[in-house]
Amino acid sequence: MIYRFDRFQADDTAFRLSADGAPVLIEPKTLRLLLYLIGNRGRLIRKQEILDAVWIEASVTENALTRSIGQLRKVLNDDSREPRFIETVPTAGYRFIAQIEILPSASTAAPPPATPTAPPPARGPRWLHLSAIAIVCLFALVAVSWLVAARLHPAPVIRSLAVLPLNNLSGDPSQEYFADGMTDELITELAHIPNLRVVSRTSVMLDKNANKPLPQIARELGVDAIVEGSTVRSGDRVRITAQLIDGRTDRHLWAQSFEGSASDVLGLQDSVAQQIASQARLALLPSPPRPSIDADAHDAYLRGRYFFNKQDFTRSVEYFEKAIALDPNYASAYAGYAAALDAETTFGLGLPGDLMPKALAAAQRAIQLDPRNGAAFTELGSIQTIYSWDWTAAEQNLTRGIALNPNDSIAEFKYAMFLDAVGRPQDAVTHMRRALELDPLSFFMNRRLGATLYLARDYDAALAQLSRAAEMEHEPGSIDNYMSLIYEQKGQRDLAIDQDLAALHDDDPGLDTDALRSTYRQHGWQAYWRARSGALLSGPAQPCTGYQAAVADIRTNDVDRAFASFNRALDEHCYSMAFIRVDPLLDPVRHDPRYGALLTRIRQ
């Protein structure tokens, strides 16, 4: 074939390159490299694959490949920073991105007409009959061959996939937030495909710099296929290049580049998702036309998402506020703003009474602007669960969020919290397992499943799950606290004290934990919790200080003070109070009328 691109023609049969019809002087190895890149156009070709294919007769290093790519760029007058032909994917490989027109080469062109000869004698009906039979047989043979080929190499069935972090090809590390944000949005777009499981961002981000073979990544994430690609933003233009790979066979299935203006970036993501859905032989539900968005507002939104994922919630709130100021009709920015305010409250960075009403209003505004924004429904339901205790509305909004985003692990997690709050712990476990299926490598999801199993009184399973979470990430405070509670319920008080002191030390290294340990050894369980409560109340007050003091008071049989502390925690909207129906720590006081009064206060 002759491959025509721009002003060049590469002939693989004659083994030559020409420009505007004139031969181009090029080293044979470099031409072979060009033909291999063209033959695999649109696909990210990893460096080792190129070395094995082009330098098949010799063992060479990557330096030879780098040198040939440089020569090729020089011949084609291609710029690595703004490539027209060969795109470099840092640390990975190369991709041929130019449009190709395929022409038949001289060797495959139709043969010249033969010298005229006398016409053959006329054939009778028998000849016509035999010819018809031959043609039918030929077509039958082709059909059988096609069926055999289809049976030997059937189209892969894709029921699950993961989107690996898109490579930042801008050459500017400060633009990493943009590539991460585009990855997030592409995952969200693909998650709308029915009957397809899409792994959440936390798990795929762990493989951002791992350089593992794709089949290994697919096995670890439990998916059939992998989407990988790159994005680059230059001025007002954005280009997304994506490819779909069968993770079971490492076979390339599809690749394409998409380019458009920064204001139409959501439309570009729609196009990528539609193509992937088509290749996976699945139907992506049609979405209403996307309005153009202010490019600066979108940039601020992506920065807000970036800092949210880094758990820098204060900066996240600032950027979401900026996005809303630049585009007051940006629904996703309102949803992100609500989630960041919710997180600030949970992590004790602000008072619930100050932050949660703003979060509630933002989530409601996001839904007004975009009734199909699943994240906004999920966040609204979360706020109604842990702050306003509006249980009927909370379940309606949380289930609506799951219906709109069936692959959203956060939606499943938030719904599991609601189910615990209303006294349905087994259902909560089911939905937390679904959340973990969608985000299998997330430390947070693994830990939360352990906590959910604890609330369901499945203590051994909870310990096993928390141990798995501890192997993933070293955050002793967030693990040891739950382990302490479990050992307490199992009657293993020595282990419970050890884990509680470890959690205390992690939260406040300056606290005299040796003195508390000595109190336990000398005076026992109740004396420890009296001292522990005193240390807690002497520190800075937090919205859930009252709840922690109350459960300590239950341990020391000071029930009157416990209920006074519980009511204070309710006044301060401590989110832990939403789970008093299932919290084992409250078992000793459930017969007390004041416990029923607490349920009445939270409308249960």
Image: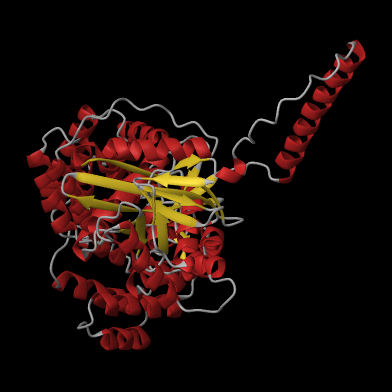
- Residue at x-position 35% and y-position 66%: 90
Question: Depth check: 442 or 522 in front?
Answer: 442
- Residue at x-position 79% and y-position 19%: 119
Q: Quadrant of residue 30?
A: bottom left
Question: Depth check: 162 or 96 in front?
Answer: 96
| Picture coordinates of residue 72, whole percent (x, y) | 37, 63
| Picture coordinates of residue 323, whole percent (x, y) | 13, 44
Q: Quadrant of residue 506?
A: bottom left
Question: Depth check: 450 or 298 in front?
Answer: 298
Q: Quadrant of residue 362?
A: top left
Question: Depth check: 234 or 84 in front?
Answer: 84
- Residue at x-position 43% and y-position 75%: 64
Query: In the image, is 512 to the left or to the right of 433?
Result: left
> Does 10 appear above or below 366?
below
Query: In the image, is 224 to the left or to the right of 81?
Result: right
Residue reaching furthest to the left: 325
Residue reaching furthest to the top: 125
Residue reaching furthest to the right: 126
For residue 413, say whether it is visible: no
Query: In the image, is 202 to the left or to the right of 597?
Result: right
For residue 394, say whether it is visible: yes
Asked which colour scheme the image uses, the reply is: secondary structure
| Picture coordinates of residue 129, whole percent (x, y) | 88, 15
- Residue at x-position 45% and y-position 49%: 243
| Picture coordinates of residue 530, whole percent (x, y) | 26, 74
> Does 47 appear above or below 563?
below
Where is the C terminus found, in terms of image quarters? top left
> Does 194 appear above or below 485?
above
